[in-house]
Image (tube, helix red, strand yellow):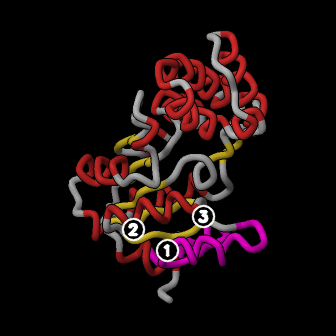
Amino acid sequence: MTSAAELVRQAHAILLDFDGPVCSIFAGLPAPVVAARLKQVLVKEGAELPEDVEALDDPLKVLRRTADIAPELVDKVETALMGNEVEAATSAEITPGVRDFLEACAEAGKPVAIVSNNSAPAIETFLALADLGEWVTAVSGRPIGAPEQMKPHPQSVLWACKALGVEPNRAVLIGDSDFDMQAARHAGTRSIAYAKAPGKADRLTQAGADAVTGSIAELIEQQ
């Protein structure tokens, strides 16, 4: 397997998932709290929540399931989620090494796009607060009102490549979920699994990752 640093060196452009590789967005406002708020929106609007939805503690999963159980409420839940994400972005924790990595990408002439299932306003809020905006050329956030087009759908990856002016096969996506690896494969980009938890590297490799890293900082070496 090609090393993660070598894939970065070969790439003409870098695509970064947001929650994980760039920051922990729900570090200060936990994801289960946001999920509970979204479920409250659904109940207030008269939706009956199936047991599996009641048990969800991931706000993005609540949004996905809203499209199934109450499609007429997708916009309300989307609006609530976006507001909570922007709030969460103000207390998000930056991922170690990402600032130096973005600077190295700029010095190497590799444009960077954020490709995320989080909303663009939340991403832009964090980038501004963390003073990272100058290093990011484009933000490809969640397709608003169309949860079915979130990763693993390739749309956001393809849009980012177009925004950066590169063919998908010349870019590499760095992400920490199965959906990232699958979206990269569907779009025709290479992928690097950012895997810190035990067993995650194997899972993401099975999902299609071309390389694995446990540290954003180690990707700087061969640029």
Residue 58 falls left or right of residue 144: right
Q: Nearer the viewer, residue 41 or 185?
A: 41
Indicate the amino acid at tag 1.
Gly
Mark 2 surroundings within 10 Å by alpha-carbon count, few (fewer than 14), some (14 through 19), many (20 or more): many
* Residue at x-position 59% and y-position 71%: 204
Residue 137 falls left or right of residue 211: left
Residue segment shown in magenta: 196-223
Disc nearer the start of the sequence (2/1): 2
Residue 180: percent from left, percent from top: 50, 59
Q: Can you identify the residue that label 2 sits on?
A: 185
2 and 1 marks in contact (CB < 8 Å): yes
Residue 28 seen: no
Indicate the amino acid at tag 3.
Ile
Residue 109 seen: yes
Q: Nearer the viewer, residue 25 or 56?
A: 56
* Residue at x-position 57% and y-position 77%: 206
* Residue at x-position 67% and y-position 29%: 88
Q: CA distance from mark 1 to mark 3?
A: 19 Å
Q: Can you identify the residue that label 1 sits on?
A: 208
Of badges 1 and 3, nearer the viewer stands 1
Q: Can you identify the residue that label 3 sits on?
A: 216
Residue 194: percent from left, percent from top: 61, 65
